[in-house]
Image (tube, grey):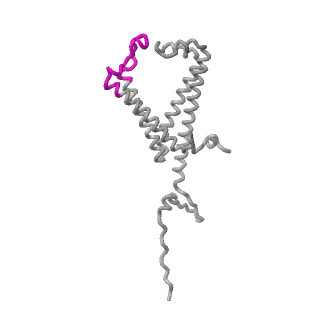
């Protein structure tokens, strides 16, 4: 009987590329996004006049302190941690080290759980959508038209949007998991085991090393006179 894990196992992902290639591309993409965020946060720390720590009253109606030094430092630390985790996943997929992929996979599960909680909160408390729209600035485009829409339609649109995001995130989780299984499976099959007839076990080297070793020439045979 085939287990559910083996049923969904595949070595190919979107665009017909290998799961290793997909994981490397995904890790690099996440690293680039977090690097941009990190640069913005560092610029805000270096030049607090240009990047304000609070929004003006013309944007939200009140002078609310949005970002201070502590929040920016926490966000910077999170960005650095994310760059490290994504770099580990990229390196692990490239060098075929399965243990390096686990932190990135755990982050994906955590992110998926947070988005699922958001979807559940929208279903349980549908009025939160209207409350969120009321907190948007007055200059937000089409704010009045969106707020005049039926609440059930807004909830359905939000749930549809979150559902598409969750489906895409679940697919990416499956790609990273398949990459982990492929890399870990490659690691366990690097050594071939051969059992002889006299109950002894002989460990053979990997195929690549065995092919690279030139065969030994047989000793010369001398004919007796």
Q: Quadrant of the N terminus?
A: top right
Q: Is residue 73 above or below residue 185?
A: above
Q: Is residue 139 left or right of residue 11?
A: left
> Magenta stretch?
42-71
Quadrant in which residue 72 is drawn: top left
Badge count = 0
Q: Is residue 60 left or right of residue 133?
A: left
**Residue 207 x, y percent position in the rendering:** 52, 58
Does residue 195 belong to the magenta stretch? no
**Residue 182 x, y percent position in the rendering:** 54, 46
Does residue 59 belong to the magenta stretch? yes
Please name the residue shown 55% across and 58% down the image. Answer: 193
**Residue 76 x, y percent position in the rendering:** 38, 29
Please name the residue shown 48% across and 40% down the image. Answer: 25
Q: Nearer the viewer, residue 85 or 168?
A: 168
Q: Nearer the viewer, residue 96 or 161?
A: 161
Q: Is residue 184 above or below residue 141?
A: below
**Residue 218 x, y percent position in the rendering:** 49, 74
Please name the residue shown 32% across and 22% down the image. Answer: 48
Q: Is residue 12 above or below residue 170?
A: below
Residue at the farthest right position: 1
Q: Is residue 120 above or below residue 219?
A: above
Residue at the farthest bottom position: 225
User: For the stretch drawn in magenta, what is the main secondary structure?
Assistant: loop
Q: Nearer the viewer, residue 204 or 94?
A: 94
């Amino acid at each position: 009987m085939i287990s559910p894990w083996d049923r969904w196992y595949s070595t190919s992902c979107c665009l017909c590329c290998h799961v290793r290639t997909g994981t490397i591309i995904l890790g690099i993409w996440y690293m680039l996004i977090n690097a941009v965020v990190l640069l913005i946060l560092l610029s805000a720390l270096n030049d607090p006049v240009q990047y304000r720590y609070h929004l003006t009253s013309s944007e939200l109606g009140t002078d609310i302190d949005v970002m201070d030094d502590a929040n920016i430092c926490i966000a910077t630390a999170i960005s650095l941690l994310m760059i490290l985790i994504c770099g580990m996943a990229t390196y692990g997929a490239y060098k075929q080290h399965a243990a390096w992929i686990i932190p990135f996979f755990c982050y994906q599960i955590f992110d998926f759980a947070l988005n699922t909680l958001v979807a559940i909160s929208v279903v349980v408390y549908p009025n939160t959508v209207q409350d969120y729209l009321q907190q948007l600035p007055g200059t937000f485009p089409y704010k009045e038209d969106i707020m005049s829409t039926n609440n059930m339609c807004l909830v359905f649109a939000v749930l549809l949007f979150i559902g598409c995001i969750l489906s895409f995130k679940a697919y990416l989780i499956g790609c990273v998991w398949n990459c982990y299984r492929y890399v870990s499976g490659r690691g366990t099959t690097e050594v071939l085991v051969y059992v002889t007839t006299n109950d002894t076990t002989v460990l053979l080297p990997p195929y690549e090393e065995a092919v690279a070793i030139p065969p030994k020439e047989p000793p010369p045979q001398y004919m007796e006179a």
